[in-house]
Image (cartoon, helix red, strand yellow):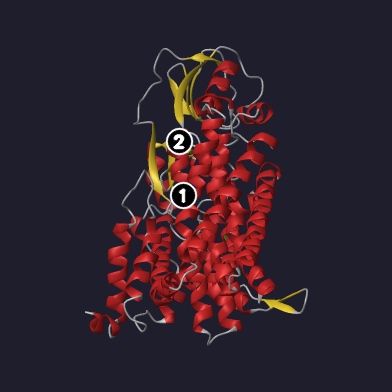
Amino acid sequence: MIELLLHNPLLLLFVVVGIGYPLGRVRVAGSSLGVAAVLFVGIGIGALHPDLKLPEIIYLLGLVLFVYTIGLSSGPSFFRSFGPRGLKSNLLVLGMLALGLGLTLAAQRLLGLRPTLAGGLFAGSLTNTPALAAELEFLKLRAPHDTQALADPVVGYSISYPLGVIGVLLAIGLTQRLWKVDYRAEAERTREPGSANQPLEARVVKVLRATEEPLGVLMQRLGWDVVFGRHQRGDQLSIADLSTRLQPGDLVTVVGPAQELDEVTAGLGEVSQEPLAHDRSVLDYRRIFVSNPEVVGRRLAELELPGRFGAVATRLRRGDVDMLPQENTVLEPGDRIRVLTRRDKLDEVSHFFGDSYRAISEIDILSFSLGLALGLLLGAVPIPLPGGVDLKLGFAGGPLVVALVLGWLGRTGRFVWGLPYSANLTLRQIGLVMFLAGVGTRSGHAFFSTLTQGGGLSLLVAGGLITFTVSLATLVLGHKVLGIPMSVLTGLLGGLQTQPAVLGFALEQTRNDLPNVGYTTVYPLATVSKIILAQVLLAMLL
């Protein structure tokens, strides 16, 4: 069997993935390794023979696909995170990453670790695969023929990674028990602007007081984050747009989070005890796939739906999340938008947005290839650092930085940079398993050599202590000093670790959606920062 795998690298790839992927879904004490199990299976199979390894091009291609797709999807949230609301959280994350770097340097000196092993310890204790990839790229430029140096980061990463997950879960469990956190009460007190993280509801409101101002002015003045839909006055049914002035006795449908709907109801009148006329032969609605390249990447206000079609967008579904469409909402390929308009306009509106499931399953090869090429070029540019050291973003950092910018831009002229949601997730998953299988098989022999020669246990303990210390410091400073709600903070800690397993644990503990807010606020900056800090660490030690 080993001889067969030695001569069939593609077979080796799919054997590793085929065993590792389902193994990662096995839950022990409520947690699982996830896709990282592919790495450990790769290490185990690679240890069977020194030459049992995948070609370098496989893991490099996987790496580029993985970080580029992450960047495209994270671009908008990355740049929004530098606003006033996200600044405090991101500064906390940067401080904690600096603490993790300092603890890694201390462990390297106390244990006498090789610098390359310390690099893997840093990436593993903070469970960040792109940081590991950046270290490998850095070492390939410094010591392209030193097989030990190239294997060490993966060894350090794989030994410290398990406690890099468990240590965070222990810190969350300990603090929430000591502080007796009431997540339900916290969720009731915490109100995040916007509704992407809150369930949307629809309500019929009966107007008791005339609005002297049009709805658009009223919404802006009172800060109502809702969408108005159908409007009934007597027997006449119409669409409530921004110029509508409501009168006593009118019925109007409102879509938004429950707390926003309560405010709107109190401001306009009361919840209607009679249903609004539901004659779909006049006004009708449809959920439409956004697939037209002319529409993708544009703000909803630019499309002028009320003036062009007499239509209003009432809901937007992106992936598995319902969002409230607003004027500044940028449409992405694969979005499903719910539009209310006259029945005879529905087909025209559907054609305008594209409404092609096949189109959203495809990618624009030209813009995708051009974006990757720009990322690879940026990764090859040397960046001078103090002390005469040159830093390169490499295959991991270059595509990620370019993708963050392109994901934020959305489109440039006729170039649409974004990917359909499903295509992005598929490419990301394929890229990640290719990378993990590649680096796992290429480091398996060195991994077990390190364990058998001693030093593996000290790496394991050091990684666990680094993870637990950083996690505990984040929770104490964030909750007790900065006053961040624990529901948000547990998700923020998952974003700091760039660890979906932590986010899943946080969602199970809080039983609300607030951890998603913390996670998405800091995840992009944490990823980029770890990539840079991992290379800075090696530059300082080598």
Q: Position of residue 416 (x, y in %)?
A: 52, 63
- Quadrant containing the N terminus is bottom left
Q: Secondary structure at mark 2?
A: helix
- Residue in the image at 30% along x and 78% along y: 10
Name the residue tied to disc 2: 509
Residue under the image location 66 percent in, 78 percent down:
381
Examine the rendering and report whether any part of residue 381 can be seen.
Answer: yes
Secondary structure under tag 1 reads helix
Disc 1 packing (10 Å; few <14; some 14–19; many ≥20) = some
Gap in Å between the C-alphas at discs 2 and 1?
15 Å
Question: Callout 2, which amino acid?
Answer: Gln
Image location of residue 311, percent across then percent down: 48, 39
In the image, residue 168 above or below residue 213: below
Q: Residue drawn at (49%, 65%), measured in percent from left and top?
A: 157
Residue ID for mark 1 = 166
Q: Where's residue 212, x and y in %? A: 66, 20
Q: Nearer the viewer, residue 425 or 190?
A: 190
Could you say where residue 269 lies in the image, as x and y percent from the top left? 55, 14
Q: Amino acid at mark 1?
A: Ile
Left or right: residue 395 versus residue 362 is: right
The C terminus, quarter of image: bottom right
In the depicted structure, whether residue 493 falls above or below residue 129: above
Residue sitting nearer the eye, 325 or 25: 25
* Side (left or right) of 18 relative to 121: left
